[in-house]
Amino acid sequence: MSNIVAIVGRPNVGKSTLYNRLTESRKAIVDDVSGVTRDRHYGVAEWVGRTFTVIDTGGYVANSEDVFEAAIREQVVIALEEATAILFVVDVTTGITDLDDDIAALLRKSKKPVLVVVNKVDNNAQQADATVFYSFGLGEIYNISSMTGSGTGELLDELIKSFDEEPVEENTLPKYAIVGRPNVGKSSLINALIGKQRNIVTPVAGTTRDSIHIHYNQFGHEFMLIDTAGLRKKTKVKENIEFYSVMRTIKALEEADVIVLMIDAIEGIESQDINIFHLAEKNKKGIVLVVNKWDLIEKNNKTLKEFEEQIREKTAPFTDVPIVFTSVTEKQRIMKVIETAELVYANRSKKVATSALNDVMLPIIENYPPPALKGKFVKIKYITQIKGTSPMFAFFCNLPQYVKEPYRRFIENKLRENFNFSGVPVQIFFRQK
Ligand code: GDP
Ligand code: GDP
């Protein structure tokens, strides 16, 4: 299920403020200076039970003036190709500028859903000013104030109408996406796996022309690989290479069951890698970390452990994730990557019998019950796994609101110790009974 919403528009209209509101991230920096480097440019948003990925294109624009407008126009083109829907943000306080007109012209050519978002409509008087934006010929306009949040509800109601229906899963093979920054060795890994059989690469119906799905069926392993490296698109503006690769990665990530996140051993794990990791975690995908180019590292008996600790520190609190150290060029541990992805896939699809859950977890809980709060005791009565694509557990108890985060974490760790959910996000709910 892949719904990606791109926020486009010229600088300073409020894209980043809107992004923050939709993803409720307090981390990204909003700055009056346009073109500032921001922390995170994509994240998960939710509205009436539908989750989708939002990408703030403003984060990918370079500082230099001469590439600025060309880069923005190209981003709109990329966003139109890759996203499910576009939020075209304009600013009521400035009215229509030339760059707004240029962007509108690009958007009019597309069949993708485009919503015109008139931002900074902070009061009623400005509602009237907003009507000039009908002249884009892009249909209805949505007046909002990203600052206060007013109008965003109606915008989101309309936005989710443009999403695809939940698809009926016609291909039930496990899907593994190979992702990672440029040059980590993604193409090399895929080549090593499929070798001369490149011709088995078949575009699968329902995916876009840019998304390569490879059907692997050899040596008793059968799965789909989603390749984000195979097709390298030429961008005219070099600043957009990262933007393009992020769009491709998000898309692959949403389609996949397990994310194989490749890291360069020389460079170590970087903020971009961690962003992808967290996005996979939020999307409840399985994760395998692959540290490639291990041949280039000078090793002693502590190297592996130190490397692992460094990764765990940066990916905390989700540390129950397998790490495979590979050298693709030396053909070291390539099949181990696949076997690990298969294991994580199995963990993600695992169904634990209610009897086994209760037999194991109730004595643990009895030994170490939730701490009493305001003199009240929480009594957990029974546990079941909830049906879903990733592991979810309901703990039925008398006072669910009294169970706090540290205890939830304790329960999660015990589930992991006893049932093996390595590489898989686990959700735990305390429910009234
Ligand atoms: P971006 O460059 O398009 O991402 O724009 P930003 O989100 O960085 O916002 C540019 C400026 O507009 C900042 O000073 C924001 O505080 C301000 N801004 C954003 N949304 C609103 C709004 O709804 N009302 C008002 N009055 N200001 C806003
Ligand atoms: P991609 O951009 O992630 O697809 O990366 P490529 O597969 O194109 O690899 C980038 C470069 O790294 C190429 O020159 C590869 O030969 C090299 N490379 C890939 N894997 C390894 C490895 O395990 N060890 C070493 N030393 N080089 C590697």
Image (spheres, rainbow, N blue to C red):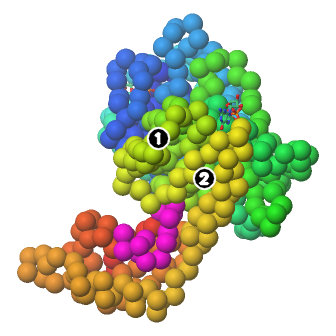
Do we see residue 349 in this rendering?
yes
Which residue corresponds to mark 2?
Answer: 259
The x and y percentages for residue 47 are 47, 56
Is residue 115 left or right of 211 when viewed as pictured? left
The x and y percentages for residue 153 are 43, 50
Q: Are marks 2 and 1 in contact (CB under 8 Å)?
A: no
Query: Which callout, 2 or 1, points to the residue nearer the camera?
Result: 1
Q: Quadrant of ligand 2?
A: top right
For badge 1, the amino acid type reads Asn
- Is ligand 2 less than 8 Å from the beta carbon at label 2? no
Figure quadrant of residue 359: bottom left
Give whichever of discs 2 and 1 has the lower sequence position: 2
> In the structure shown, which secondary structural element does the residue marked by tag 2 occupy?
strand
Q: Dividing the image into 4 quarters, which one contains the C terminus?
A: bottom left
Is residue 19 left or right of 104 when viewed as pictured? left
> Residue at the spot x=53%, y=26% of the render?
60
> Residue at the spot x=67%, y=37% of the render?
185
> In the structure shown, which secondary structural element does the residue marked by tag 1 occupy?
loop
Q: Dividing the image into 4 quarters, which one contains the N terminus?
A: bottom right
Q: In the picture shown, does residue 260 fall above or below 169?
A: above
Which residue corresponds to mark 1?
Answer: 300
For badge 2, the amino acid type reads Ile
Mark 2 residue crowding within 10 angstroms, few (<14) / some (14–19) / many (20+): many
Is residue 44 left or right of 369 when viewed as pictured? right
For the residue pair 404 and 324, the one nearer the viewer reads as 324
> Residue at the spot x=75%, y=61% of the render?
223
The x and y percentages for residue 405 are 27, 65
Q: Is residue 421 in the magenta section? A: yes
Q: Is residue 281 in the magenta section? A: no
Give the residues drawn in magenta, as a range.
413-425
Q: In the picture shown, does residue 250 fall above or below 286?
A: above
